[in-house]
Image (cartoon, helix red, strand yellow):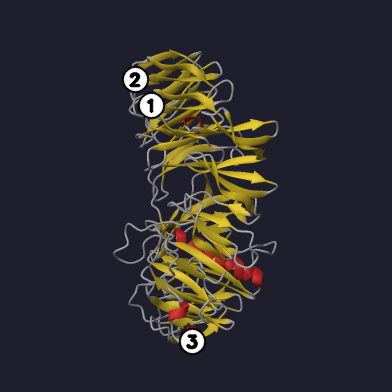
Amino acid sequence: MTQWKQNRRLTFLFLLAASLGTMVANTAESKHPSILPIVWKGKHGLIDRGGNLLLKPVFDDLGTYHASGHGMVLRLPPIDTEAWMAVQVGPHYGYANRRSEIVIEPKWSKASAFRDGRAQVCLNERWGLIDLQGNYLVEPTFSYLGDFYEGRARVAVGERSRPSGRKWGFIDESGKVIVPPTYDDVRDFDQGRALVNVGAKRGGESGNALRGGLWGVVDQQGSVLIKPQMEVDQQLDLKAFDPQRGFLPVTHQQDRRRIKIEGRYGFADKRWSIVIESRFSDAGQFSEGFAAVKLGQKWGYVDGQGRMVVEPSYDLAGPFGEGLAPVQLGGEVRYIDAAGNAALIIRAEAGEPFANGVARVRVGELWGFINRTGELLLSPQFTRIIPRDGGYQVTGTDGKQGLVDEAGRLIVSPQYDFIGGFQSNGLAWAGVGFMGEQLVHTLIDRSGKVVSSAETYRYQPRKQGDLWGIWDSQEDCYAIEPRFSDLKQLDVGILQVTVKSRYGMVDLNTGTMLLEAKYFSMRPFYEGLALVQAPNQRHPFGFVDRTGTFVIPPIFDDASNFEDGLASVRFFRRPVTDLLWIDKTGRYLWDPRSQSEETSEPAGLIGEQ
């Protein structure tokens, strides 16, 4: 494997480990999974959070290939499966057990983990299916073989690089072709039915995404229930990841799905049976049991059975929210109930549905907020309103941003160049300048109170000409003379400063340099530690605390931020890159130096400065 591919692979393995959910018991509160990938001397293995080896680092790669097309995913089978993990030995993949013993000889170019006693394997660019003994259930004949859902799996023949592209169909668990691969696209079975497409073409930014075409429906016996005739504008392939079972379908939450046939809109149910005939020139999505539909030039509403509950008489119509829907007629916005009765009439150009007893309305070019009685909570004064966690981000006519809470109360007047939504800790960041370039200087709680701001410190950033310095507001002089070309906040009260593309660290509590501006890079603080790249060509990365002290010395070639008490660290040892894990004391979860000779390294190599 080339160095570039190795580094890309290691980057993926870290992102993978950081993003997977809990995999075994007793770790429900951990953000990191309980099973972590390691690489030592270029060989791959697995450990748990206690540092115990689950799979010795003796393999050239792990079976992170997932044949159903969702990219490389480390999918783990049940812990008691004998053929526990797909592993690479030399150029081929086979399967190892928990004792790191090969139980199915490596002979495939790619392999996925077992699921329900089956695993996808690839030979000569063709996918097949094997059992736990390595016997073929389906010979490698398909250019694509997906996971089984409801006893059926997507298969493809042909190559997507050719003008004709792939053709898609389905097989059952015995390998029998149920739906011949003649379609341009298909979706996995859900509730006994699957969508099939004719006419889809590749497009999108990557050029590989299938777009367009007409959709039909087949059942599990392969019978065509609806010939391809529908345009569908909703996400068709929502999946949720399960560590043992891979990607599973997410049942659509709405009872009705909008479809389009021959230029007219209608609705299908969750199983894609057409329940409301396509007869509307336009239609919205269902909300609270009703959907806005357009006949001719006017909008009305239908219920789930397609009955017209509000006759088409409005210029525009929006979705229901809290029992009322905004409609527009002339220069008025009305909020009507499901019987068409107007609960509110407002002189406005547009309105949004109610949420938490509050609705947004636009008068002229400006937006404001009303309550359910039509009373203006905030007069139209904002050019834009964006829902955020815990409220709304609002933009004033001067482009400055503020915050409105869920009840429509202005808690931060528009005064910042950017302001984020409230985080899980109940605080929101705000700042001036352009994101990524500025000093992020204010932290606000849900009441709008400034919890922390540069202006609250004795020592404050101040610009003179093109350079920043640190001003002592009590002595009325510079504590640190202007010499920084840029400032950026790393944590509350701690700034990153820049001098000639080198970075340092300043404490606004004391007005002192924690680190001189000589470092190659710095990252924000996570769990009290910040990753810093030192001017050291051999092992440049280490971690500092809020005093600027290297509590974990710069001995790594790369590292991740800490999360849930763990960080991954990497060592570049041409032509391979090794991956280990440390805790916040710098202790390795699994230390090769304490292992047997076959996996150990002479003392001093890890942690050597």
Q: Residue 389's quadrant in the figure? A: top left
Mark in front: 1 vs 3: 3
The residue indicated by pointer 1 is: 354
Q: Work out whether 96 lies above or below 580.
A: below
**Mark sitting on residue 372:** 2
The residue indicated by pointer 3 is: 598
Q: Work out whether 115 lies above or below 30.
A: below
| SS label for mark 1 | loop
Q: Are marks 2 and 3 in contact (CB under 8 Å)?
A: no
Q: Nearer the viewer, residue 138 or 465?
A: 465
- First in sequence: mark 1 or mark 2? 1
Residue found at x 43% / y 86%:
101
Residue found at x 30% / y 65%:
25
- First in sequence: mark 2 or mark 3? 2
**Mark sitting on residue 24:** none
Instruction: Tell whether 163 sits left or right of 69.
Output: right
